[in-house]
Image (cartoon, coloured by chain):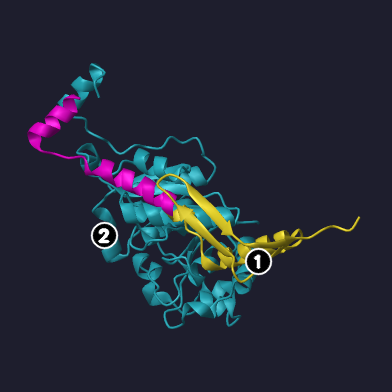
Amino acid sequence: MLSGLLKRFTGKNNSKDAAKKRLQFSLIYDKLEVNDTTLTDLQQDIVDVISKYFEIDKDALELKVKRDDDVSALVFNTPILHVKRKRA
Amino acid sequence: MQGKIIVVTSGKGGVGKTTATSSIGAALALEGNRVAIVDMDIGLRNLDVVMGLENRIVFNIVDVVLDRCKVEQAAIRDRRIENLFLIPASQSDNKDVLTTAGVERVAKQLRSRFDYIIMDSPAGIERGFENSVVAADEALVICTPDVSAVRDADRVIGLLYARSLNPKLIVNRIEPARVTRGEMLSHDDVMEVLSIDLVGLVPMDEKVLISSNTGAPLVLQNDSKAGAAFRRIARRLNGEEDLPIEMPVYKTSMWQKISKTFGLK
């Protein structure tokens, strides 16, 4: 509080606080970045698993990382053509 | 003898890797160890000039890895410090001339001849970095208190974790007066952001440039604060793990003291 007042009088600003905040944010964002190979590999794996149970339209599916301010989500969209029935 | 390989790395260039490598290597030798410093910055060698050994190069690390000479032929003995050796980088080759398999083979030979092998990694995270870390038992990450160095350090730390290495941090070029003024990240800030263990704090020191001008070892200058800090880091690496980390002096202003006393912050 006093240092805040002092800062106002002297016009000094703690630029290091800004540095720290910006760093913390950018490091979080850096870690959420996914490269294309990872996404392609993941998509193939997901398709393989789903194909065991459903017939899906492999040309219409899409996989992407959706980013909001505080959460990051993996969105996988695929039309289901029909369910595979397991033979008893 | 089964020596330990320590890689010194940073991601970003120009944060003091070469100074740290030569100083820690020299200090470990002063502690009585047989030490080899290896310059892994192929094509951009610098450790030789910093250590004052540039006139004595005959063979280099590329020659050793490609089996053109023996380790003993490439290791230059330091004149001032006993049991300190430098294996220089090649200046003419390009980074891709080394393979991780080749480096690992030479690492085995180095371990049997030295107590400590300090690898100075090139800046960046490409091939040269891979070659420097492939045989490492321990890793040191150097960073200065600025946003780009800290961010790059974070990236490198992630890559080292992925190789099952548990890196330790050295914060270099701390300017206590600027930290007090709130113009510079403190070592606490850096550690909080990176959340890894600290092995040493090195203050900004004009003596670093001066000793590199003449190629004299920083750790032999009695009045060098950075030299003293590197010697303490070496002692910590050499088994004195509990040696306290010396904080660069932060002068607190009268107002800060008063507000702290009243709990106002």
Picture layout, residue B37 above or below residue B63: above
Q: Residue A75: name its quadrant.
A: bottom right
Q: Residue furthest left?
A: A9
> Horizontal and vertical percent for residue B4?
59, 55
- The residue that mark 1 highlights is A44
Is A17 covered by the magenta stretch?
yes
Q: Quadrant of the N terminus of chain B?
A: bottom right
CA separation in Å, label 1 and label 2:
54 Å
- Magenta stretch in the rendered image: A1-29
Residue drawn at the location 21% of the way across and 21% of the way down: B259
Find numbered disc 2 in the image and state the secondary structure of the residue it sits on. helix
Instruction: Indicate which label's residue lies in the foreground, 1 or 2.
Output: 1
Q: Amino acid at mark 1?
A: Gln
The location of residue B239, given as percent across then percent down, is 54, 42
**Quadrant position of residue A60:** bottom right
Q: Which mark is residue A29?
A: none
Magenta span: predominant SS is helix
The colour with which the image depicts chain A is yellow
Residue B210, image x, y percentages: 25, 59
Please rate how many residues cluster around mark 2, counting C-alpha atoms within 10 Å: few if below 14, some from 14 to 19, many from 20.
few
Q: Among the chains, which one is cyan? A: B
Quadrant of the snapshot with the C terminus of chain B: top left
User: Taking the image as drawn, is residue B222 in sight?
Assistant: no
* Most distant residue in the top direction: B262
- Figure quadrant of residue B218: bottom left
Q: In the rendered structure, the residue with mark 2 lies on which chain?
A: B
Q: How many tags in the picture?
A: 2
Residue B162, given in percent of the width and then of the height, sits at 58, 56
Q: Amino acid at mark 2?
A: Leu
Residue on which the image places disc 2:
B209
Query: In what element is the residue under mark 1?
Result: helix
Taking the magenta stretch, the answer to whether it contains residue B4 is no
